[in-house]
Amino acid sequence: MVSSRTKAGLKAAKDRGVVLGATMDAGKRAMAMANRSKTADRNAAKVLTTISSLRGGGSTLQRIADELNRMGVATPRGKQWTPAAVRNAHARGIGG
């Protein structure tokens, strides 16, 4: 029943002229992606010195994540650091 009601509702919306699905044009999508990339680069730059110095000292990604969390440094989204987040920030900060 849910499926048939959903299909009927979508058909009614389409009949009224409502555009269904992704409506962002390619130019806006490209600009949004570029803005997200710039923001991620800026955020990575904020912790690059700490990550690079710990990496140079032979620390593992987990140890660096633990140290950033111990220092009270949150990720750009306000979360705890993980090894993957450290790797991604380091890769962004070194250009790659």
Image (cartoon, rainbow, N blue to C red):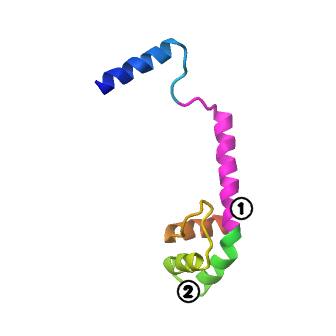
Q: Residue 56 at what x, y percent from top left?
A: 62, 84
> Residue at point 54% right, 70% down?
81
Which amino acid does the dot numbered 1 rest on?
A: Arg
Q: Which residue is mark 2?
A: 58
Query: Is 38 within the magenta?
Result: yes
Which residue is situated farthest in the bottom direction here? 57
> Residue at point 55% right, 64% down?
79
Q: Residue 24 at what x, y percent from top left?
A: 61, 32
Which residue is situated farthest in the top direction here? 15
**Label placed on residue 42:** 1
The answer to whether residue 85 is left or right of residue 46 is: left
Q: Which residues are magenta?
A: 22-45
Which amino acid does the dot numbered 2 rest on?
A: Gly
Q: Nearer the viewer, residue 62 or 18?
A: 18
Q: Secondary structure at mark 1?
A: helix
> Residue at point 61% right, 79% down?
71
